[in-house]
Amino acid sequence: MRKLFERIVDFMEENGSIQSEYRDVYLFALQTVAVYAFNIGTGVVIGAAFGELLYCMIFLIAFMLLRQEAGGYHAPGWMSCYFLSCGILVLTLLWIKAEFAYQTCLTIAAALAAGMGIFLFAPLEDKNKPLEEAEKKVIGKKARIIVVTELILGMVFLAVNQRAAYAVLGAVIWCGVSYLAWSVKRYTEKNGKSREDNN
C-alpha cells in the first residue's frame, strides 16, 4: 500500500502538482486518509456485527475529530495502525455493551484524567508531521475546545443515554491512552539514542 501511495505522490510531483519538499507531508496525508477510510468501513462492519452500529459511529466521529487535532501515538505502518484501531473499536464496543457496578464512575474518572492530559499537552506531534510554534498554538486551541466539548457532551449523555455517553467519553479515554503510548515511545527512543551515543 505504501508503494502505491509513493507512486501517486511521485506522479503528482512529476506533474508539478506538489513541491518536492512537501513530498513526505502528502505521503503522510494519503496514508492517514486511507486509514480513516478503512477504519470507517471496518467500523460499519464491526458495529453491525456487535449490533451497536449507532454507538460505533458516535465513537468513531468523536475519536477522529479529537485525534486529528490532539495528535498522539502513531503506529509504525498503516497496517499496524489499522489493526490497532480495530482493536480499540472492539474494546470500546465491549465496554459499551457491558453492564457492571461502578462502570459509569470508572468511565468518568478515566475520561477526566485523559481529558486533563490532552488539555494540558495538546498537540503531540508526530516525527512525520512536525509542527511550527504558530501551528501548535492554533491546533492546541482546537484540541482543547474539542476535548472539553466531548467531555461535556459525555456528561450530558449520561443522563439521557449511557451507551452514547460511553462512546463519546471512550474517544477521550483512548486519545489519552495514545498520549501515554506517545510518551513511552519518546522515552524509549531517547534512552536508546543515549545508549548509542555512550557506546
Image (spheres, rainbow, N blue to C red):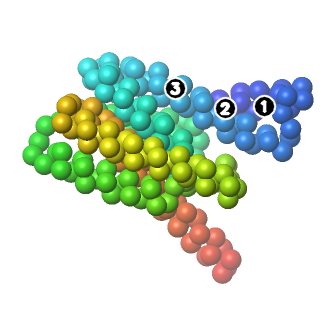
Q: Which amino acid does label 2 sit on?
A: Leu
Q: What residue type is labelled 3?
A: Phe
Q: Mark 1 points at which residue?
A: 9
Mark before the other along the chain sequence, 1 or 3: 1
Measuring 36% from the left and 29% from the top, which residue is drawn there? 58
Q: Mark 3 points at which residue?
A: 38
Q: Which type of secondary structure does the marked residue at label 1 adopt?
A: helix
* Residue 3 coordinates in the image, percent (x, y): 72, 31
Q: How far apart are marks 1 and 2 (CA)?
A: 9 Å
Whether residue 175 appears in this view of the structure is: yes
Residue situated furthest left in the rendering: 101
Measuring 39% from the left and 42% from the top, which residue is drawn there? 149
Q: Which type of secondary structure does the marked residue at label 3 adopt?
A: helix
Give the crowd class for mark 2: few <14, some 14-19, many >=20 residues within 10 Å.
some
Measuring 55% from the left and 31% from the top, which residue is drawn there? 35
Q: In which quarter of the image is residue 14?
A: top right
* Residue 100 coordinates in the image, percent (x, y): 11, 42
Residue situated furthest bottom in the rendering: 198
Q: Please tell me which residue lies in front, 180 or 118.
A: 118
Whether residue 75 appears in this view of the structure is: no
Q: Name the residue under label 2.
A: 30
Q: In which quarter of the image is the C terminus?
A: bottom right
Q: What residue type is labelled 1?
A: Val
Relative horizontal placement of residue 146, taking residue 32 as reference (left or right) = left
How many numbered marks have been drawn onto this rendered protein structure? 3
Q: Do the residues labelled 2 and 3 touch (CB within 8 Å)?
A: no
Measuring 31% from the left and 35% from the top, which residue is drawn there? 167
- The image shows residue 91, relative to residue 46, as above or below, that is below
Q: Please tell me which residue lies in front, 120 or 25.
A: 120
Q: Do the residues labelled 1 and 2 touch (CB within 8 Å)?
A: yes
